[in-house]
Amino acid sequence: MREIQYKPSDDFKCLQLPWNPYEWQFGIRGARGTEFEGGIYHGRLLFPEEYPWKAPSFMFLTENGRFKTQTKIRLNWQSSWRVRDALLALVDEMDTYPDGELGSIKYSKGKRRALAMKSREAAPKYGTSERQKLIDEIHQNLLREAPVPVPQLQQTRNTSLARRCQS
């Protein structure tokens, strides 16, 4: 956690739960130049007692079109990684198309784009009021610290897709 406090990133924000040292809330930005650009994606980071030798699990709370929500995701873990490395790897992994990976889904680029736009509107609702305060703080921080304009969808059939995703 110290590393993240001293070397903050515009690409993510995470906060440890004060009542559980093995769980953090995180928010990541969608990678620039992808259909996720401008999106804000929230999730939980769950550390095993054997960390860093055993991989943490990630669970998204924001619908994103790449990973199922509230489903554990594991990255190809390297014990030399820090939380920063894992979160940046997760951002990179979002822009891939899954091949039957556990916890993955395969939405079109247009639908992923629409979900990126929708993700900026509000933080997901999850858990206790204390947890929700952390989620909201992360969301506001990511919007305020380095706002990234979300490129609009082309005025084609993707626009109607964006409307369907918002309803």
Image (spheres, rainbow, N blue to C red):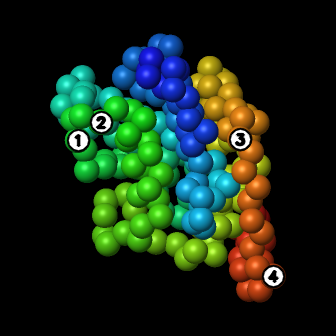
**For the residues bearing labels 3 and 2, Cβ distance under 8 angstroms:** no
Q: CA distance from mark 4 to mark 3?
A: 27 Å
Please tell me how crowded label 4 is: few (under 14), some (14-19), or many (20+) other residues with Cα within 10 Å.
few
Q: Is residue 24 left or right of residue 48?
A: right
Earlier along the polypeptide chain: callout 1 or callout 4?
A: 1
Please tell me how crowded label 1 is: few (under 14), some (14-19), or many (20+) other residues with Cα within 10 Å.
few
Residue 45 percent location from the top left of the image: 42, 35
Q: Is residue 117 left or right of residue 68?
A: right
Viewer can see residue 63: no
Looking at the image, residue 36 lies above or below residue 135: below
User: What's the residue type where badge 3 is placed?
Assistant: Ala
Which residue is at a point 74% across and 86% down the rendered structure image?
A: 157
Viewer can see residue 2: yes
Which residue is at a point 36% across and 46% down the rendered structure image?
A: 72
Mark 4 sits on what residue? 155
Looking at the image, residue 22 lies above or below residue 141: above
Q: CA distance from mark 2 to mark 1?
A: 6 Å
Q: CA distance from mark 1 to mark 4?
A: 43 Å
User: What's the residue type where badge 1 is placed?
Assistant: Gln
Q: Residue furthest top?
A: 19
Instruction: For mark 2, give the secondary structure.
Output: loop
**For the residues bearing labels 2 and 1, Cβ distance under 8 angstroms:** yes
Mark 3 sits on what residue? 146
Q: Residue furthest right?
A: 155
Which quadrant holds the N terminus? top left
Q: Is residue 100 left or right of residue 70?
A: left
Which residue is at a point 76% across and 79% down the rendered structure image?
A: 154
Please tell me how crowded label 3 is: few (under 14), some (14-19), or many (20+) other residues with Cα within 10 Å.
few
Residue 81's disc number: 2
Q: CA distance from mark 3 to mark 1?
A: 29 Å
Mark 1 sits on what residue? 78
